[in-house]
Image: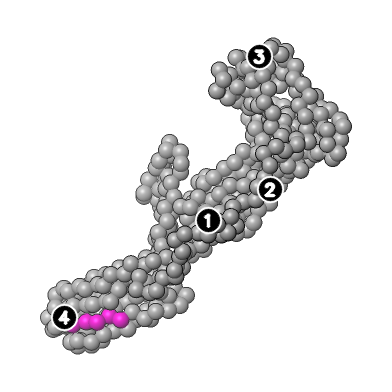
Amino acid sequence: MELKIDFPQRASIGQPVRVKVRVAIDGEAGVAEVRYTGVRLSAIRPCEKPLIIEQREIFCSGKFEAGEYARSVSFALPANVVPSSAQRGVRYKMEAYSRVPGGEGEAGSDQEYFDAGEIALVENRNKNKVLEVNPVVLAIKGLKLNLQKDIYRPGETIKITFEARDIKELKVLLMERSNILCNCTQYGRVCTQVPRIPPSAAGAAKVASPTTGFLLLQIPKSAELSTRHEWEPKDRTTWNDKFGDFNEWYLAVTGTKYSGEDISFDIPIEIDEGRITTEKQEEVPFFETSATAMASEEPFKPAFQVKPLKLAGIARRDDEIDVTLSNEGTSAFHGCTCKVTGIKDLFFETKPYMAGFSAIEPGASKKIGGIKLAKGVTEVTIEIEANEGKLGTFKSSISGA
């Protein structure tokens, strides 16, 4: 078996990403049994153990003839997933994997095939987001500081107005602090694999013998925006697993009084690209015209579509069925799969079974035999797909077959 995966190197968070998978089964054994084939997106944690973010099934358990099977799946990246970051080591891997029974002498063990590569997840931040700013006033030990606001843009200058009494020197540093957040069932919040990254200074200003005045600090134009992300799995059985990161900015204020007493405290600030609330907002029409409303709608698609394959018949033999398909179209289909799901007690689906065959020519029929069913199944759903796309879904009663 040969397994290949193809996907874009970059993808936007919250948007669908399309992944193509190709499975080539050689003809040595005639028919190969496959346990499972799927695609998964995983975060690479500091300990290198993958944390599954999303996964999709390609093939369920079944038997496949020799041939090449190509499939394309699409799934939306969760809106709360953590963006890739080279600075903090946030990395992701897109992987196709398949399990098949082990060879002779390997009873009870499965053989696994993989093909994977790294993918960068990009966050598209809203630059028109409204930022609600607040003034900052802080007084302690004879020192009073005043900031007009607590949110700034990259490249902007921070003006720090001060009033001081009996202070020998005043110093203010623009500091950045960032790291990765990683919790797991084994280590919880205490993980020795998470690196300890000390804060770094991006600017400094100081004054001797201050009384009244102001200090200016320039925010670098290349400054990374303030951010905090945290992702948790949907499956609550792994409720201890959390993955995230943060990037924080603050002003580190230090001073020395003439008495020798030290003053030290931090003022948190944010760096963002949004719009300050005092800025003029672009008008948005409250009502849509009929023309704009109709333009936003998807084009009409007829509900009735001709299916290129026809379910020619189903024959039941105790707990097995034989399915016969016929190609009534003018084109051949390659890498075909037939997924059969039994339905019992009108509502409950049983474990699906999949049969793969290399091709079906125009005007030809294909019989798929020996499909096992669970007890009590009275109806089946049959989904047909090929390398060329989905070929149809059929439902049929087999209670009297």
| Badge 3 amino acid | Ser
Q: Amino acid at mark 2?
A: Lys
Q: Amino acid at mark 1?
A: Ile
Q: Residue at x 86, y 39 (%)?
A: 330
Quarter location, residue 262: bottom left
Q: Is residue 24 visible?
A: no
In x, y percent, where is residue 253?
26, 75
| Residue 177, image x, y percentages | 37, 66
Against 282, residue 341 (above or below) is above
* Nearest to viewer (mark 1 / mark 3): 3
Q: Name the residue beneath numbered marker 1.
A: 13
Q: CA distance from mark 3 to mark 4?
A: 92 Å
Q: Which of the marked residues, 4 or 2, is nearer the chain's N terminus?
A: 2
> Mark 1 near mark 3, Cβ–Cβ under 8 Å?
no
Whichever of callouts 3 and 4 sits on the residue coming sooner in the sequence is 4
Please tell me the numbered disc located at residue 257: 4
Residue 152: horizontal and vertical position, in percent?
Answer: 37, 73
- In the picture, the quarter occupied by the C terminus is top right
